[in-house]
Image: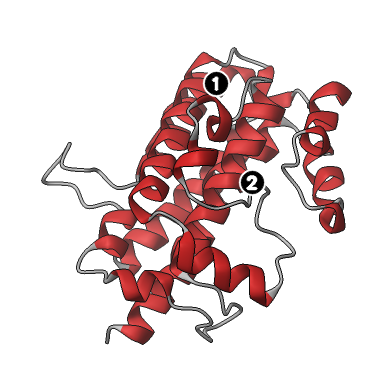
Amino acid sequence: MSLEARKIWNANHQQLTGIITKPEEHANAVALILELHDCLYASRGNNPEQTNYEDDLLKDLLEQTMRSYPVHTANSSNSIVWHIWHSARIEDITMNILTADRDQILHSEHYADKLHTPFIHSGNGMSEQELAEFSAAVDVEALLDYRQAVAAGTRSIITGLQPGQFRKKPAPAQISRISEEGAVKESEQWLINYWGSKTIAGLVLMPATRHNFVHLNKAMRVKLKLQK
């Protein structure tokens, strides 16, 4: 994704912010969400003429580069695999628990086992030792499959929403599930309060779209630093 394409993405995201809670704009908001979301995920050959941000990140990307930790770049020292996993985990948690009140993809499609890592939380608050362990052990192919599965789940949730539902907030029982399922470390409970205070619109605007965009930017900085 070129600098110009990222500027367009940001402009469209700003446009979405202005319409997402308006029931009369529901169809336009859903279409724009799907467009913004799709730009962030690898096309996997579905559209050879279209290159998405994840396509750009993965092109000629070495596994050694993906696992490298620490890598000191702007605002982060984390590995590319961590950025991919962290953004997918947060999207999985916020979309499936807080928006749809259904099982996380991590569990429903058995990725907790496929990823070959004991960590099932959001990735916030990890120690350096934990980050190094995760970066070395995670199954890269399963990680990329997990990210695609989470994306597909999110798109199904978004298309199933009805006009006015973007204004809804998660129910207390949904918020409680985050702790019950170990989706956030005990030291990072502030995340639950943060997400729980948001409407579905807020969860879409940040974790499901912009949060992914931010972490792809950070992952790309790592790639550019290590594979000049």
Q: Give the residue pinned by disc 2.
A: 120
Residue 92, percent from left and from top: 58, 37
Numbered disc in front, either 1 or 2: 2
- In this rendering, the answer to whether 133 lies above or below 16 is below
| Relative depth, front residue between 8 and 152 | 152
Residue 150, percent from left and from top: 47, 36
Left or right of 221, for residue 95: right
Residue 133, percent from left and from top: 56, 68
Left or right of 188, for residue 53: left
Q: Would you say residue 36 is visible in this rendering?
A: no
Q: Residue visible at 44% across and 67% down?
A: 80
- In this rendering, the answer to whether 54 lies above or below 179 is below
Residue 27, percent from left and from top: 48, 20
Q: Residue visible at 55% across and 83% down?
A: 74
Q: Residue visible at 31% across and 69% down?
A: 63
- In this rendering, the answer to whether 5 lies above or below 30 is below
| Residue sticking out furthest to the left | 48
* Identity, as a three-letter code, of the amino acid under mark 1: His
**Badge 1: how crowded within 10 Å, few (<14), some, or many (20+)?**
some
| Relative depth, front residue between 188 and 43 | 188
Q: CA distance from mark 1 to mark 2?
A: 34 Å
| Relative depth, front residue between 28 and 201 | 201
- In this rendering, the answer to whether 177 lies above or below 128 is above
Secondary structure of residue under mark 1: helix
Q: Residue visible at 33% across and 55% down?
A: 54
Q: Earlier in the sequence, mark 1 or mark 2?
A: 1
* Identity, as a three-letter code, of the amino acid under mark 2: Ile
Secondary structure of residue under mark 2: loop
Residue 197 sits in which quadrant?
A: top right
Q: Give the residue pinned by disc 1.
A: 26
Q: Would you say residue 72 is visible in this rendering?
A: yes
